[in-house]
Amino acid sequence: MVEDLERLKQRIPLLEYLQRHNWKPCRAGSRQEWVGLCPLHQETHPSFYVNAAKNLFYCHGCGQGGDLIRFVQLLLHLSFRQSVAHLEQELTPAPASQLLDRAMAFYRLQLHRHPEATGYLQHRGLHDPAVIEELGVGYAPGGNLRRHLAGWGYPFDLLLDTGLINNQGRDASGREPVWAQHWRGVPPPFAAALQGRTICLGVSQ
C-alpha cells in the first residue's frame, strides 16, 4: 500500500499537478523552490511554497502543508481514500488533444532543473520569469519525456504519431529550448533567432 502511494505521487509531481490546475508560481530562492498565491484560501500576497524536489507544499498564510494527496484532500474536501481514487483517475489516459499540453507542462518543469537552460535564456536576453512563464518556455533535456508520458498511460504509437518520439523510441527533442507556441506552429517574438534550427545548448551559435 505504501509503495503504491509513493508510486502514485511520483507519477504525478505536485508542481506539475498545480500548474495543470492554473497555479501560477514564481521561483523562490533555489531552483527547486516555488511560491505563488495559495489555492486553499484567498490572499493577495504569495505565501504558498512548493518544494519540487521533495514533492511537498506549505502555506505560511493558512498553515496547511503536506504532499499531493493531502493537497487534494484540502482542495476538494475529500477523504484520504477519495483523494487517492481521484488521483488514480487522473492517470487514466486523457484524449490525445491533452497530450501536447502534458508534454509542455513536463518541459516547463524541466527548465528550472537545468542551469544550462536558464543560462542560455539569459544569454539570449530573456531574464524576466514572468515573461518566461507567459510564453510557456520550457526545456527538453532528452531521454525523459517518453517515460513520463508512458506513466500517464499514453501508448508508444500515439507518442510516435504526435511526433514526440522518433521511430527508435527516443525523445524527438533533446537539449533544446521549447515553448508553448511551438506546439501550435507559432513561435514567440523573442525566438526569431531560433526559428528553423535546433539549438544545442553549450555549443556556440
Image: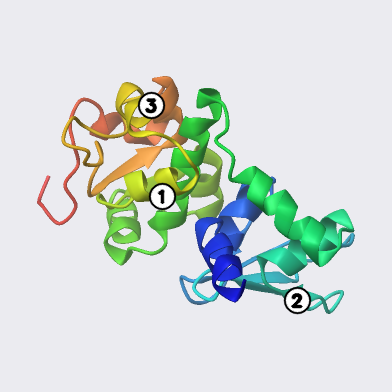
Disc 1 element: helix
Proximity of marks 2 and 3: CB atoms separated by less than 8 Å = no
Q: Earlier in the sequence, mark 1 or mark 3?
A: 1
23, 4: nearer the viewer: 4
Depth check, mark 2 against mark 3: the one in front is 3
Say above or below: 170 vs 123: above
Describe residue 142's horizontal placement relative to residue 57 as left or right.
Answer: left
Q: Amino acid at mark 3?
A: Leu
Look at mark 2 in the image and give the residue it sits on: 65
Q: Where in the figure is residue 192, as x and y percent of width and height?
A: 30, 29
Q: Amino acid at mark 1?
A: His
Please, which residue is most extreme toward the front here?
Answer: 1
Write the residue at 86% across / 58% down. 78
Residue 148, numbered label: 1
- Distance Cα–Cα, label 1 vs label 3: 14 Å
Write the residue at 49% across / 32% down. 99
Callout 3 crowding tier (Cα within 10 Å): few <14, some 14–19, many ≥20: few
Disc 3 element: helix
Q: Where in the figure is residue 5, as x and y percent of width and height?
A: 61, 67
Of the 4 image quadrants, the one containing the C terminus is top left
Look at mark 3 in the image and give the residue it sits on: 158
Proximity of marks 1 and 3: CB atoms separated by less than 8 Å = no
Q: Where in the figure is residue 153, as x and y percent of width and height?
A: 48, 41
Q: Earlier in the sequence, mark 1 or mark 2?
A: 2
Q: Is residue 44 visible?
A: no
Q: Is residue 175 visible?
A: yes
- Distance Cα–Cα, label 2 vs label 3: 37 Å
Q: Earlier in the sequence, mark 2 or mark 3?
A: 2
Depth check, mark 1 against mark 2: the one in front is 1
